[in-house]
Each structure stands twice: as structure tokens, then as C-alpha cells.
């Protein structure tokens, strides 16, 4: 038998239906690949027994010609998603030993459609990071390396476990979350496809919260079709999440291959930032040419408040996180470091339980919400956020979708940026605007950097217009013909 | 804040002159609702610790609040009952602080944009006086859990049953000027809430608690610095706490000191307030809009529908009782204090002598209920039976005196007065022949008294007493009077 892990999600789906192999065989292939890939540190928990049980149950259904849209397909789950009875820590020490008595709605949707859980994927602690180096369980290593160089490269973050696992074929696809670029940037860094849908498209119920007004779940997958299949199963209204939106989930796969004739693609001039590598600029230009050749009309647009997006994001997100993370106090679950009184216990627990980046953001957030600073920081940031969203509304009067680079550079080496949080934050410069405006965005692999690392292009859509995103992403994928794969160096 | 001329009776005489108390109250009223404000868990009182706690109440990772629409309706209803502005758009904020009984590390409350704005309450005071107290706002918020410190020497425990229960915080304007007014305010607010069915007003179970803001000033002068007395849980304690706190502040000021703005606690055992935390120690709550919840939008049509369904409120009921039954404002005020009492009264008074009914309800029935520790809901005497008793008086079947005797029997047995009259043979004797015979017997037995009575007509009362005694009180007193007067030759007409 050929290596089953080579198949895409769609390919495996079709092959299972045709009974070319069983879900258990497929699942075992992945469990074997995971076991052989420990140097990548993608999985923090492997649920092998559970995976096999789920696969067997799927095989019974498939045998009867039944089963859901993802029947028998093995997936990786970002550790931010609560999984019933399975360790869920958001890769933080403070959630030591926490096994939720509940299943997140998004993963529940996947199991409902028949998917198989391989395990929990590494991520930046509480999804705070752009390189997956803040995880309590250590950094994830990108399967990609620079040409002729063994330097360990970051897989992006915060969904670095998801992106690396998909790129290294340690799952068919993975769930991820995106608060400021945490799906799209890791996808760009690993040559995978990642889509952050419109805010409200996927339920946040049971997803460990980082910044509630920005957090949104989405998939990372090998190609656009797989991402479309995944999102259809993940998305949907949930009355347990007050910010969830009640509208039907379309068949995203059906929009793939549709013509771009008459479609207007906006190019925001503010995304041509100072110091951006020439190869990113060149990639962007290539993307424009591809879409033009596919029949789209290219229009120049302006998003004048773009330059305020990062500072705005780094006020809003920490403010919300400082409050969201207050529940990790050592009283009810997770880590508790005893103290001489309650305040001492709080301080010791939170000092020991949170890593540097989380503590930094909790402190920033506490500061910007404090009496006397609220108006100057948080309130101002919310006003700017409104202006950023309005930029997009005005741009969409002239175009249907926007094309930008996903990140201002290719993936960097582990440890290269950890000492300088500001240069790390700059990674999110093209992605945070999308979260601030609540829009959908997708990253598609479009080429390699001069030293052989993947680069991605981002498409930003109108609210709840994921269908157009998938349609254009598919065209981009067709044109880019990105076939490169990382050399398999990690197998023990 | 209303401008009010200081009343002499309200002023406190200090060493250096008169002082005026200025009071504002924040009342926390638990919303009557089966479920909590943002989770489906039960909000019932008295369950075993930590048995009414959902994943949301315990703030597990990834749990999200969903507004309980019924609690919103209850808040709107209360706002309408307080004749207040209803805000069609309000916002839930997070009030951040750490405490073991606050699982989320923040309380979801409403800070800048409450669901209910300004309104007012008419309070009823001694001597038929009434005052208007302004309502500043009403907002919805979650209750915290309960810390229990006495189960072990070195550890505390937390009961999260209350965690997430819906509260309405009702904030008054600083319009009250005496402990009596503050007590009357809470009494009236409680009555309105109970009429509306939006809070059971049970202060013992903590369904209603008040934070009292107290300051003193020279009569009509500029406002003084206030202290907030937290969580006072009975109307009596509210009065005591205010009296103590006002005198404490006056003493400090008269000795040349100044008041520190602070939060204080009332100790009912010692009858005093004690400092809890100063302004400097106050939390910085870092309020910001809760990103898990959208702004709360309600539509005018729903507000109108709630308005149309409001019950008759105490002030309207009082006015109607005065107009319809000719009651005194005092009696009407007493009767509308509880809706059940007013309903009872109306059931008794309907088609009967309203004044007589009022006396029987407020004097006889209330007296017995108070003595026996019963409430109107648990009264052994039903409105129907009390009405029947009044009918028996009105149609002369029994005398007022016998009626009291029957009432006691009714209270003991819950029996029907007509049956008691028949069974115990208590029907009033109006048969003049029988009464005349009884009178003749008394006259015949007391010739000396008859002679004296001719000199001293007031002695007739003695004869009435003897006749009533010999008839076991059943003789119609009016008939006895008439015949006696004639027989003793005392009648005015000869």
C-alpha cells in the first residue's frame, strides 16, 4: 500500500467512500507518522486509543454506505479547543491536568460529521504568539528548512502545531484559531491553506478564550478544497455563543472552480510597508497577474487607517485577555501554588502558571483598562477599530475581495525574534486588520522565498462572503501551482 | 437630587448646632427567575452547596454567557413600576476584581449604559406625610458565590450556588433625610417589587440587601463627604446603621475632624458601623464592555406589552381604595402594604360595609395574625368567612360582641361563622317578648336598684349588663336599651 498520508482530505474522503482502505488503516498511518515525528513537537497529546475507536465506528458506518461529510477522516485539534475527558491546557502550565467535562462546539460539529481525533496540537500559550515559541510544552519546529541549512525554523503562531502537523502530513487537516493572524500566518509559513472565517461564523463555545471580540476558529489544510470541506463542518450557529450568527452554512466546495470573470480584486496600497522584502513584493505582483489572467479586474484601493491596526490590536487584545485570564486563579481547577493567604496564592499561582508573553499581555491589558488610562488607550483603540472597519466597507464599494501578502516575511529561525516582542508583533501587520474588522481572510501558498521557505498570499473578503474567498483562493492555487514539499528530515 | 426644605423634626441637634442627614440607597434585589442571569442553572435558594452550578457559573475555560431574556423582562417590568425611563439599548460590562467567590474574575454588570434610567418612588411616612424619592438607575448584574470561612481552621470554602444569580441594582438619588425615610423607602420599594413579582423581597434569604450612603451637613448646606455602609440586610438594621453612622460623623466634624470617604460594615450585635476599606484601598474595577455579549437591544413594542400587563401598583391601589371604599389614607396605606392584604380586604369589603370590613381586617385579623405569627397568606380565617361574619353582624343575626367571640373560634378552627352561630346557638335574640321577660326578671329581683335608677339614670347600664348576662350576650343590645328605658321610666318621650 502507498503512504496513505499523502492523500488530501478530499482524496481520502473519496477513497474511503470507495472502500479503497479503511478509516482504521488511515488512522494508523497517521498515528505512525506522528510517533515518528517527535522532533517537530506538534502534538502535545496523542489520543491513539480514542482515534482507533472513532475510526472503527466510522468504518462500520462507511461499510453500510453511511456517514457524515468527514466520516473516518483523522484530524488534529489545536489545544485551545476543549475536548471532553482529554487534557486541554491551551499549552499553559496554569491549566495543568485540566480535562474538560465538555466538548467545544466546533469539535463536536466535526465528530458529528464523522471525523476522527488524532490528538491535541501544540500552540502558543493561550494563543499568544506568532511563532509557537511561547508554549509551555516547548516550541513547534517547522518541517520546512532553509535551503542547505538545518536551522530550526518556526511554524508561525499561534496555530503552529496545526500548521506544522498539516505540512508534515501528521493529520489530514487541523482546527486552528485566529485572533490576529494565528491561522493565516502559520499557514503562510508552512505552505498550507488557512482560513479565518467571519467573526460569528464558528462557535467560540468551548474554545479557551484569548480576546473574545477577535477570536475565531477556522481550519488549516493542505489545499483550498480541504479548507472548504473543513470549514463547512466546523461552522454553524450556536445559541450558546451570543456572538454566533444565525445564517446557513453554504457548501463552500461548490464555489471552487467558478470563474473570476467580472470579479474586482482590490489592492490596498497601505499594505506596501517600509522594509518589506522585495521577494514579498514580487510575490504580491505575481498574485495580481495571476488573478488578472484568470479574468478578474484589478483595482487600487485605500485602507487609510491600516497603520493604526497593530497598536489598536495590541491594546484591544491584551485588554480582553487580562480579563479573560482572570479565571485562572488556582481556586477551582488547574495549577495551584499554595500561599500564606489568598492573595499570596493568587500571585504565586499566576506567576508560576503563566509564561512571559502571557504575563506581558495581562499587564498591558490591565494597564490600558485602568482608571485614568481607559479613555486614552482602550476607548481610543475601539474608536480606531471602528475606523479600520469602515475603511474596508468603503473599499468594498469598489471591489469584491482584497489581495495582500499574508506576512511581511518568510518564517524565521527559532529564537531569532523572542528577545524583541515588537519585531515579533510586526508579523501580524497584514492580518490583524481582518480580525479588528471581523472579516474573513484566507492564506494560500504562492511561492518560495529565495532560501526555499514557503510564502503566502492573503485574500480578504466581505462579511460572510467566504464563498468568494474560496473561489478566488482556488484560482490563485491553480495559478501558483505550489507543489513544493518539505524534505522529510524529522523521521526517527 | 431634589431640593427639600429641611424639616426641624429630622435635624440632629449637635453641640455646635443642627445637622441634616443626606441618604442615598443602592438596593440589590434578586430577580425572581427560575434560572440565573447568564446560565441555565437553577436560582433557587437553600440547595446543598455547589449543586446549582453550571459550567458557565464555575467559569470553566471557553464557557460563554447567554442572557436570560426573562430576567431582562423582569428588569423592564421593575423599571416601569418605578415610573422610570426604559433604555432600549443597554450594555453589559465586566467589573474586574479577584475574589474566590467570583469565578470569572469579573462580575458581569452594567456600568455606563444601564437598562433602566431615572424614575421615582413615593414613600409613605408617619402622619400621612409622603415624599418623592428619585431613582437614579436600575441595572442588571450577576451575584457572586458565597465564601464560607468556618468549616476549617486554615481553609475557606466557596459555595457557587448564588454565582450568576440575577440581581437588579436599584440606585436612589440622595433624596432621603432621615432613617425613617430610608426605612420607608426600602419598605415601599420592597412592596412595589413584590406587587410586580420581580423580587420576593425576602431580606433574610438575602433577596434584598441595601448599601446605604450616609453623609451629614448643616441644614440646606453643601453636601458632606459620604460613607457607604455595605450589605445591610434588614429594614430595622438600616435605621440603626444610619442613626449610628450619622452621629459618628457629626461627632468627628464637631471635634474639628473630617470624614474619610470609605466603605463601612454594620455590625448588628454591637449596633455600630466599622471601617471596611478606605477610598485609597478601593478596587480599580477596570470596567469595559463584555465582548462575549452583544449590546442588549429591546423593542418598544415589548416594553409596551409589559406595561400593559403591569398589575395595579400600591399607589394606584391606595388611591382607588380611598375613592371606592371611602377608607382613610392611613387604613388604605396599611392595607396596600402587601398585595395579598389588599386583595384580602377587597374580597371581604366587596358589597359590604367598607369601614366595618377595614376595622375587622386591620384591627381584629391583623391583631390575631401578629399575635400568632401568621401571615395573611397563612391566615386561618379566609376572606370569605370574614365576609360572612360581617354579613351576620350587618343583618343583626349576631351582635358585635358575639362576633368577636365567633371570630376567635373561626381563627382556632378555620370554621364557617354561620355554622358556628348555629352550632353554638349564638344567634342574637331580637324577639321583644323574650327580652321583655328577661328584663322583667331582672327588675323583679332588684327593686332597690330600680328605685335608685329613677334618681340616677346612668344606672341603666347596670341593668343592660344583667340582661345581657342572663341572655348569654345574645339579646340585641338596642332592643334591650329601648325596653329597659321604658320599663324604668327613663325614656325621653316619657
Image (cartoon, rainbow, N blue to C red):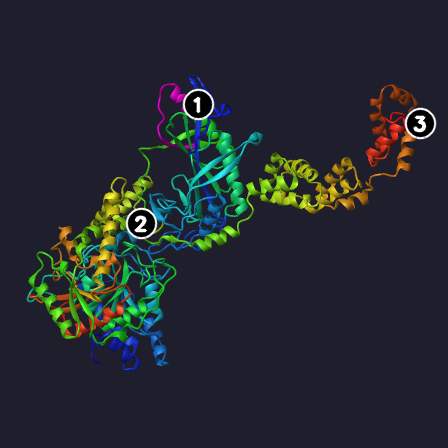
Q: Position of residue B364 (x, y in %)?
A: 68, 36
**Residue carrying label 1:** B19
Q: Nearer the viewer, mark 3 or mark 2?
A: 3
**Residue carrying label 2:** A328
In the figure, B376 relative to B226: above or below? below
Chain identity of mark 1 = B
Quadrant of the rendered structure where residue B436 is?
Answer: top right
Q: Nearer the viewer, residue B34 or A15?
A: B34
Q: Secondary structure at mark 1?
A: strand
Q: Is residue B481 left or right of residue B182?
A: right
Residue shown at the point (26%, 59%) measured from the top left: A438
Q: Position of residue B383 (x, y in %)?
A: 68, 45
Magenta stretch bounds: B248-265
Rendered image: mark on residue B444: 3
Quadrant of the rendered structure where residue B195 is?
Answer: top right
The quadrant of the image that shows the C terminus of chain B is: top right
Q: Is residue B459 left or right of residue A319?
A: right
Residue shown at the point (52%, 34%) measured from the top left: B184
Q: Point out the residue furthest to the top here.
A: B15
Q: Residues within 10 Å of mark 1 (few under 14, many from 20)?
A: many
Q: Is residue A72 visible?
A: yes
Q: Nearer the viewer, residue B323 or A362?
A: B323
Q: Nearer the viewer, residue B131 or A118?
A: B131
Amino acid at each position: 500500500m502507498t503512504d496513505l498520508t499523502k492523500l488530501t482530505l478530499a482524496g481520502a474522503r473519496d477513497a474511503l467512500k470507495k472502500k479503497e482502505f479503511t478509516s482504521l488503516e488511515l488512522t494508523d498511518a497517521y498515528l505512525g507518522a506522528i510517533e515518528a515525528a517527535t522532533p517537530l513537537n506538534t502534538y502535545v497529546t496523542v489520543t491513539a486509543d480514542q482515534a482507533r475507536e472513532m475510526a472503527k465506528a466510522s468504518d462500520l458506518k462507511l461499510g453500510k454506505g453511511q456517514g457524515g461529510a468527514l466520516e473516518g477522516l483523522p484530524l488534529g485539534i489545536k489545544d485551545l479547543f476543549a475536548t471532553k475527558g482529554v487534557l486541554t491546557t491551551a499549552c499553559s502550565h496554569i491549566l495543568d491536568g485540566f480535562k474538560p467535562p465538555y466538548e467545544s462546539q466546533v469539535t463536536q460539529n466535526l465528530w458529528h460529521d464523522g471525523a476522527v481525533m488524532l490528538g491535541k496540537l501544540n500552540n502558543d500559550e493561550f494563543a499568544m504568539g506568532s511563532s509557537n515559541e511561547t508554549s509551555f510544552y516547548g516550541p513547534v519546529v517547522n518541517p520546512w528548512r532553509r535551503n542547505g541549512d538545518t536551522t530550526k525554523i518556526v511554524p508561525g503562531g499561534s496555530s503552529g502545531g496545526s500548521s506544522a502537523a498539516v505540512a508534515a502530513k501528521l493529520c489530514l487537516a487541523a482546527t486552528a484559531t485566529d485572533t490576529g493572524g494565528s491561522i493565516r500566518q502559520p499557514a503562510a509559513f508552512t505552505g498550507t491553506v488557512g482560513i479565518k472565517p467571519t467573526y460569528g461564523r464558528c462557535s467560540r463555545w468551548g474554545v479557551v478564550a484569548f480576546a473574545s471580540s477577535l477570536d475565531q476558529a477556522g481550519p488549516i489544510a493542505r489545499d483550498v478544497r480541504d479548507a472548504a470541506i473543513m470549514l463547512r463542518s466546523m461552522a454553524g450557529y450556536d445559541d450558546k455563543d451570543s456572538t454566533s450568527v444565525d445564517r446557513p452554512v453554504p457548501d463552500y466546495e461548490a464555489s471552487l472552480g467558478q470563474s473570476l470573470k467580472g470579479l474586482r480584486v482590490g489592492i490596498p496600497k497601505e499594505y506596501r510597508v517600509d522594509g518589506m522584502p522585495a521577494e514579498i513584493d514580487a510575490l504580491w505582483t505575481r498574485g495580481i497577474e495571476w488573478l488578472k489572467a484568470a479574468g478578474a479586474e484589478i483595482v487600487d484601493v485605500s485602507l487609510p487607517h491600516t497603520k493604526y491596526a497593530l497598536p489598536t490590536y495590541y491594546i484591544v487584545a491584551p485588554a480582553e485577555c487580562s480579563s479573560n485570564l482572570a479565571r485562572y486563579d488556582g481556586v477551582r481547577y488547574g495549577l495551584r501554588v499554595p500561599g500564606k493567604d489568598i492573595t499570596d496564592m493568587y500571585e504565586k499561582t499566576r506567576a508560576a502558571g503563566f509564561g512571559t508573553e502571557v504575563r506581558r499581555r495581562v499587564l498591558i491589558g490591565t494597564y490600558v483598562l485602568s482608571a485614568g488610562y481607559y479613555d486614552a488607550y482602550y476607548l481610543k483603540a475601539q474608536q480606531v477599530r471602528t475606523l479600520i472597519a469602515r475603511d474596508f466597507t468603503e473599499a468594498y464599494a469598489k471591489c469584491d475581495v482584497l489581495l495582500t501578502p499574508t506576512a511581511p516575511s518568510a518564517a524565521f529561525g527559532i529564537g531569532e525574534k523572542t528577545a524583541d516582542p515588537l519585531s515579533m508583533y510586526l508579523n501580524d501587520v497584514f492580518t490583524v486588520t481582518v480580525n479588528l474588522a471581523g472579516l474573513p481572510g484566507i492564506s494560500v501558498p504562492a511561492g518560495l522565498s529565495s532560501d526555499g521557505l514557503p510564502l503566502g498570499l492573503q485574500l480578504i473578503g466581505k462579511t460572510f462572503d467566504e464563498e468568494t474567498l474560496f473561489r478566488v483562493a482556488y484560482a490563485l492555487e491553480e495559478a501558483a501551482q505550489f507543489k513544493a514539499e518539505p524534505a522529510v528530515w524529522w523521521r526517527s | 437630587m431634589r431640593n427639600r426644605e429641611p424639616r426641624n423634626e429630622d435635624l440632629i441637634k449637635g453641640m455646635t448646632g443642627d445637622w441634616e442627614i443626606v441618604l442615598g440607597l443602592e438596593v440589590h434585589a434578586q430577580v425572581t427567575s427560575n434560572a440565573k442571569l447568564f446560565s441555565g442553572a437553577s436560582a433557587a435558594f437553600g440547595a446543598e452547596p455547589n449543586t446549582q452550578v453550571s459550567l458557565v457559573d464555575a467559569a470553566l475555560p471557553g464557557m460563554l454567557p447567554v442572557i436570560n431574556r426573562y430576567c431582562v423582562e423582569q428588569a423592564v417590568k421593575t423599571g416601569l413600576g418605578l415610573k422610570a425611563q426604559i433604555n432600549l439599548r443597554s450594555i453589559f460590562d465586566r467589573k474586574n476584581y479577584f475574589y474566590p467567590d467570583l469565578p470569572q474574575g469579573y462580575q458581569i454588570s452594567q456600568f455606563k449604559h444601564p437598562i433602566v434610567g431615572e424614575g421615582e418612588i413615593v414613600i409613605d411616612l408617619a402622619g400621612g406625610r409622603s415624599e418623592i424619592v428619585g431613582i437614579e438607575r436600575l441595572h442588571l448584574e450577576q451575584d457572586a458565590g458565597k465564601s464560607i470561612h468556618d468549616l476549617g481552621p486554615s481553609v475557606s470554602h466557596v459555595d457557587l450556588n448564588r454565582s450568576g444569580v440575577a440581581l437588579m441594582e436599584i440606585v436612589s438619588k440622595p433624596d432621603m433625610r432621615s432613617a425613617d425615610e430610608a426605612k420607608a423607602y426600602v419598605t415601599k420599594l420592597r412592596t412595589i417589587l413584590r406587587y410586580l413579582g420581580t423580587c420576593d423581597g425576602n431580606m433574610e434569604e438575602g433577596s434584598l440587601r441595601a448599601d446605604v450612603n450616609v453623609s451629614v451637613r448643616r441644614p440646606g448646606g453643601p453636601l458632606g463627604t459620604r460613607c457607604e455602609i455595605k450589605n445591610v440586610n434588614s429594614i430595622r438594621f438600616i435605621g440603626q446603621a444610619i442613626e449610628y453612622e450619622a452621629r459618628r460623623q457629626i461627632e468627628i466634624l464637631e471635634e474639628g475632624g473630617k470624614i474619610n470617604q470609605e466603605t463601612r460594615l454594620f455590625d448588628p450585635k454591637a449596633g455600630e458601623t466599622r471601617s471596611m476599606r478606605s477610598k485609597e484601598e478601593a478596587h480599580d474595577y477596570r470596567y469595559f464592555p463584555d465582548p462575549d455579549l452583544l449590546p442588549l437591544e429591546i423593542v418598544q413594542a415589548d416594553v409596551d406589552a409589559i406595561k400593559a400587563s403591569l398589575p395595579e401598583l400600591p399607589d394606584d391601589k391606595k388611591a382607588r381604595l380611598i375613592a371606592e371604599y371611602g377608607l382613610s389614607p392611613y387604613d388604605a396605606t396599611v392595607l396596600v402594604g402587601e398585595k395579598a392584604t389588599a386583595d384580602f380586604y377587597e374580597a371581604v369589603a366587596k358589597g359590604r360595609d367598607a369601614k366595618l370590613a377595614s376595622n375587622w381586617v386591620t384591627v381584629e385579623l391583623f391583631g390575631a395574625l401578629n399575635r400568632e405569627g401568621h401571615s395573611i397568606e397563612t391566615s386561618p380565617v379566609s376572606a370569605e368567612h370574614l365576609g360572612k361574619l360581617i354579613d351576620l353582624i350587618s343583618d343583626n343575626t349576631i351582635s358585635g360582641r358575639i362576633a368577636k367571640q365567633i371570630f376567635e373560634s373561626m381563627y382556632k378552627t378555620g370554621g364557617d361563622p354561620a355554622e358556628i352561630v348555629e352550632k353554638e346557638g349564638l344567634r342574637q335574640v331580637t324577639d321583644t317578648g323574650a327580652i321583655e321577660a328577661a328584663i322583667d326578671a331582672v327588675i323583679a329581683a332588684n327593686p332597690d336598684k330600680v328605685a335608685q335608677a329613677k334618681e340616677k339614670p346612668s344606672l341603666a347600664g347596670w341593668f343592660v349588663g344583667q340582661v345581657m348576662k342572663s341572655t348569654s350576650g345574645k339579646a340585641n343590645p338596642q332592643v334591650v336599651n329601648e325596653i329597659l328605658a321604658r320599663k324604668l321610666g327613663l325614656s325621653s318621650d316619657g
